[in-house]
Image (spheres, helix red, strand yellow):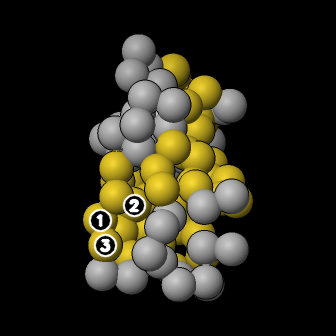
Amino acid sequence: MHVAKPGSVYQLEAGARPDGSVAVVANTGSKLQSQRLLPGLSVSAGGGFARVTDDGFPVAGATLKGGGKTLKTNAAGRASLAGLKKRTALSVTAAGYAATSFRTP
Protein backbone atom coordinates (compact mmCIF):
# COMPACT_ATOMS: atom_id res chain seq x y z
CA MET A 1 0.00 0.00 0.00
CA HIS A 2 1.22 3.51 -0.79
CA VAL A 3 0.18 6.62 1.09
CA ALA A 4 1.17 10.10 -0.06
CA LYS A 5 3.40 11.84 2.44
CA PRO A 6 2.34 15.33 3.59
CA GLY A 7 5.58 17.09 2.47
CA SER A 8 8.67 16.64 4.63
CA VAL A 9 8.37 14.04 7.35
CA TYR A 10 10.83 14.26 10.23
CA GLN A 11 9.56 11.38 12.29
CA LEU A 12 7.26 8.50 11.48
CA GLU A 13 5.67 6.11 13.95
CA ALA A 14 3.48 3.12 13.21
CA GLY A 15 1.77 0.65 15.47
CA ALA A 16 -0.24 -2.48 14.76
CA ARG A 17 -3.75 -2.48 16.22
CA PRO A 18 -5.64 -5.56 17.47
CA ASP A 19 -8.14 -5.27 14.58
CA GLY A 20 -5.37 -5.78 11.99
CA SER A 21 -5.07 -2.14 10.98
CA VAL A 22 -1.97 0.01 11.42
CA ALA A 23 -2.02 3.45 13.07
CA VAL A 24 0.54 5.82 11.52
CA VAL A 25 1.60 9.24 12.85
CA ALA A 26 3.85 11.55 10.82
CA ASN A 27 5.63 14.57 12.33
CA THR A 28 5.94 17.25 9.61
CA GLY A 29 7.77 19.70 11.87
CA SER A 30 4.73 21.92 12.28
CA LYS A 31 2.03 19.36 13.10
CA LEU A 32 1.29 15.71 13.62
CA GLN A 33 -0.78 13.92 10.99
CA SER A 34 -2.32 10.52 11.58
CA GLN A 35 -3.86 7.90 9.36
CA ARG A 36 -5.26 4.42 9.88
CA LEU A 37 -4.22 1.87 7.26
CA LEU A 38 -6.53 -1.09 6.70
CA PRO A 39 -5.44 -4.57 5.63
CA GLY A 40 -6.24 -5.48 2.02
CA LEU A 41 -8.37 -8.23 0.56
CA SER A 42 -7.26 -10.71 -2.11
CA VAL A 43 -9.71 -12.20 -4.59
CA SER A 44 -9.21 -15.23 -6.81
CA ALA A 45 -11.88 -16.38 -9.24
CA GLY A 46 -12.40 -19.53 -11.25
CA GLY A 47 -14.67 -22.52 -11.59
CA GLY A 48 -17.74 -20.35 -11.13
CA PHE A 49 -16.68 -19.07 -7.70
CA ALA A 50 -14.78 -16.16 -6.19
CA ARG A 51 -12.68 -16.67 -3.07
CA VAL A 52 -11.92 -13.70 -0.80
CA THR A 53 -8.95 -14.00 1.54
CA ASP A 54 -6.78 -12.01 3.92
CA ASP A 55 -3.19 -13.25 3.85
CA GLY A 56 -4.46 -16.64 2.64
CA PHE A 57 -7.22 -16.98 5.24
CA PRO A 58 -10.89 -16.93 4.15
CA VAL A 59 -12.94 -13.79 4.79
CA ALA A 60 -16.51 -14.80 5.64
CA GLY A 61 -19.28 -12.26 5.03
CA ALA A 62 -17.45 -10.19 2.41
CA THR A 63 -19.81 -8.40 0.02
CA LEU A 64 -19.34 -8.60 -3.76
CA LYS A 65 -21.39 -6.14 -5.85
CA GLY A 66 -21.68 -5.89 -9.61
CA GLY A 67 -23.75 -6.90 -12.60
CA GLY A 68 -26.92 -6.01 -10.70
CA LYS A 69 -26.18 -8.58 -8.00
CA THR A 70 -25.00 -8.51 -4.39
CA LEU A 71 -23.23 -11.63 -3.18
CA LYS A 72 -21.87 -12.66 0.23
CA THR A 73 -19.00 -15.03 0.93
CA ASN A 74 -19.57 -18.11 3.06
CA ALA A 75 -17.41 -19.37 5.95
CA ALA A 76 -14.82 -20.59 3.41
CA GLY A 77 -14.65 -17.10 1.84
CA ARG A 78 -16.38 -18.34 -1.33
CA ALA A 79 -19.25 -16.84 -3.33
CA SER A 80 -20.91 -18.29 -6.43
CA LEU A 81 -20.55 -16.24 -9.62
CA ALA A 82 -23.44 -18.08 -11.31
CA GLY A 83 -25.55 -15.82 -13.50
CA LEU A 84 -22.85 -13.16 -13.98
CA LYS A 85 -21.51 -12.47 -17.46
CA LYS A 86 -17.81 -12.87 -18.26
CA ARG A 87 -15.71 -9.80 -17.48
CA THR A 88 -18.33 -8.36 -15.09
CA ALA A 89 -16.70 -5.83 -12.73
CA LEU A 90 -17.34 -6.54 -9.04
CA SER A 91 -16.40 -4.47 -6.01
CA VAL A 92 -15.44 -6.37 -2.87
CA THR A 93 -15.85 -4.96 0.65
CA ALA A 94 -15.64 -6.33 4.18
CA ALA A 95 -15.73 -4.55 7.53
CA GLY A 96 -12.23 -3.59 8.66
CA TYR A 97 -10.64 -4.03 5.20
CA ALA A 98 -9.68 -1.77 2.33
CA ALA A 99 -12.03 -2.40 -0.62
CA THR A 100 -10.87 -4.04 -3.84
CA SER A 101 -12.36 -5.03 -7.19
CA PHE A 102 -12.00 -7.66 -9.90
CA ARG A 103 -13.62 -8.92 -13.10
CA THR A 104 -15.21 -12.32 -13.50
CA PRO A 105 -13.19 -14.72 -15.65
What is the C-alpha distance between the residues marked 3 and 2? 8 Å
What is the C-alpha distance between the residues marked 3 and 1? 4 Å
- Residue 51 location in percent, x, y? 58, 47
Q: Are marks 3 and 1 in contact (CB under 8 Å)?
A: yes
- Residue 5 location in percent, x, y? 58, 58
Label 3 or label 2, whichever lies nearer to me, is 3
Q: Residues within 10 Å of mark 1 (few under 14, many from 20)?
A: few
Q: Helix, strand, or loop for circle 3?
A: strand
Image point 47% across, 77% down: which residue?
Answer: 84
Q: Nearer the viewer, residue 19 or 8?
A: 19
Q: Which amino acid is tagged 2?
A: Leu
**Mark nearer the N terminus (3 vs 2):** 2
Q: Is residue 2 left or right of residue 80?
A: right
| Residue assigned mark 2 | 64
Q: Are marks 3 and 2 in contact (CB under 8 Å)?
A: yes
**Mark nearer the N terminus (1 vs 2):** 2
Image point 60% across, 27% down: which residue?
Answer: 57
| Residue assigned mark 3 | 69
- Asked if residue 33 is positioned above or below residue 84 in the image, the reply reads above
Could you say which disc has been placed on residue 70 in the image?
A: 1
To which quarter of the image does residue 4 belong? bottom right
